[in-house]
Amino acid sequence: MPGRFGFLGLCTGLLALLAGPATADPAQIYATDCAACHGSDRLGGDGPALIPQTLGRMRGPKVAEVIAHGRAATQMPAYGETLSETEIEALAEWLKKPLDHVSDWTPTQIAATRWRDPDYTPAEAPAFDADPLNITLVVETGDHHVSVLDGDTFAVLDRFATPFAVHGGPKFSPDGRYVFIMSRDGWVQKYDIWSLHQVGRVRAGLNSRNIAMSADGKWLAVANYLPMTLTLLDTDDLSVKSVMPVTGKDGTPSRVSAVYQAPQRDSFILALKDVPEIWEVATDPEAEPVYEGFVHSRRKDMIEALPSSRGLFARRRIMLGAPLDDFFFTDDYRHLIGAARDTGRGVVVNLNVGREIADLPLPGMPHLGSGISWERGGRRVMATPHLKEGMLSIIDTESWTVTDTIKTDGAGFFLRSHEDTPYFWADVFFGPDRDAMHVIDKQSLEIVRTLRPVPGATVAHVEFTRDGRHALVSVWEDDGAVIVYDATTLDEVTRLPMRKPSGKYNVFNKITFSEGTSH
Ligand code: DHE
């Protein structure tokens, strides 16, 4: 027998020689060169997860280029010298394939990642003279850091490393002392602003969307794509309180597009990606029994009581015609508008009665999560940008009609305003005019100025100081900056160099749910 295998082996070797160079085995290359940093399961380690969910949205150089040339200012080395072009291409393609199996990411596995910074000692009072409620955080995605700015002097009080690829708004504790930051790989980082120090981290999901804080500041919800769950963390020590599997009423599992805090309702609201439902999860320990879908209906036959659905984390389903995501909430949190995918329409849901009550023409992918609201002519209006159209829609939130559209220099991502400023600011994130920032009068809806502080550079996302006197704008480039403008004269006040600054978040504006910010 050994002789026969020896002969077969010889034949295979000869055939391989005749066929030319061996075809690259990407799994083997991965195991040898990548697994140590990115994890043998591709779910990340010191380096980020390498799965289609994260690679698919990678901006900048293509995966093969990063493998060949490495990434500047990171631990990612260049493999162009050690791997052939064919091997690099094969590896890049292999990484884009979904995992055969995704871990359940159980509470025990999450708990095993919990880490408290051994150098952290909580301060008794803020370790700086600045107004702690006028601190603004700048997420710098260029090198995965956050800068902590004094909102009065614009001095950088601290600059700390974050997990790789932070996404969505950091969430502050109700007193503004702590902030929680989430990465797309599901890491949640807790930072103590008073002490200017990281507290710890935990990996709450494998591929996550965003986080929300309960009204009492006790719980942090993490919306996950992988696995299809909502993770609920104790904000005190980042321990896992619960992991809710997310499945539709018919049993279909669903990714969670986003989770939002609804402070007046004392609940979280979940946008589900794969099933036509919205979930409301109570954060009130005394929450009344929850009825599926028809909370106030008199039709008893339409009410389905879930015996377990009462108290903390009681879950209520609101049934929809089709999945909705990207929510804007009215100030009283009675209504939300969600985007119905590929239909060019927005749908209004009344959360009290638990059903759709209106729909609106909103073509070109409205980005409702960036919506802001204000009083105009005695009515409450909201504005939303559109990701695929150079326009802004103005919606009357009483009659639920689109009253105006404003033409812009291109499709934009974010809007921002403040109670004490007459303008709102709209970026032009996409296209040749991505260096433009429109400043628009909230009453006349006229563009009063178009700023172009760095010709050719992407200029996007605005945040105001606590008093609304200054507007901070990101020059969204690797050697970028945050530019501080006088929000009345629109003159530049100062320019702070930053590494690809993305979102900026003022403690006061966020914890008071300013009408000019996304929540
Ligand atoms: Fe975001 C917020 C979803 C792509 C930067 N983004 C959000 C929120 C959601 C969302 C649901 C609200 C979370 C919160 O604050 O709690 N984002 C999505 C998408 O579905 C989309 C279009 C595709 C995706 O890849 O997930 C998307 N987002 C991006 C980007 O490409 C951006 C520009 C760069 C990046 O970092 O990935 C980006 N998103 C942001 C930022 C916020 C955000 C800076 C917070 C805005 C704020 O002011 O609150």
Image (cartoon, rainbow, N blue to C red):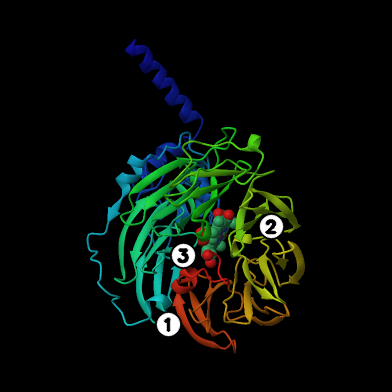
Indicate the position of residue 239 as horizontal and vertical percent values: 32, 49
Indicate the position of residue 397 as horizontal and vertical percent values: 69, 64
- The dot on residue 365 is 2
- Ligand 1 sits in quadrant: bottom right
**Residue type beneath disc 2:** Met
Which numbered disc, 3 or 2, marks the residue that appears first in the sequence? 3
Residues at marks 3 and 2 touching, judged by CB atoms closer than 8 Å? no
Q: Is 476 positioned to the left or the right of 431 in the image?
A: left
Which numbered disc, 3 or 1, marks the residue that appears first in the sequence? 3
Quadrant of the image occupied by residue 151: bottom left
257 over 22 or under it: above or below: below
Quadrant of the image occupied by residue 508: bottom left
Residue at x 51%, y 30% (from the top left corner): 19
Q: Which residue is mark 3?
A: 141
Q: Is 189 positioned to the left or the right of 482 in the image?
A: left
Q: Does mark 2's beta carbon lie closer than 8 Å to ligand 1?
A: no
Q: Which residue is mark 1?
A: 154
**Residue type beneath disc 3:** Thr
Indicate the position of residue 38 as horizontal and vertical percent values: 38, 47
Compute the Cα span from label 3 to label 1.
Answer: 20 Å
Compute the Cα span from label 3 to label 2.
Answer: 25 Å
* Dot 1 crowding, Cα within 10 Å, few <14, some 14–19, many 20+: some
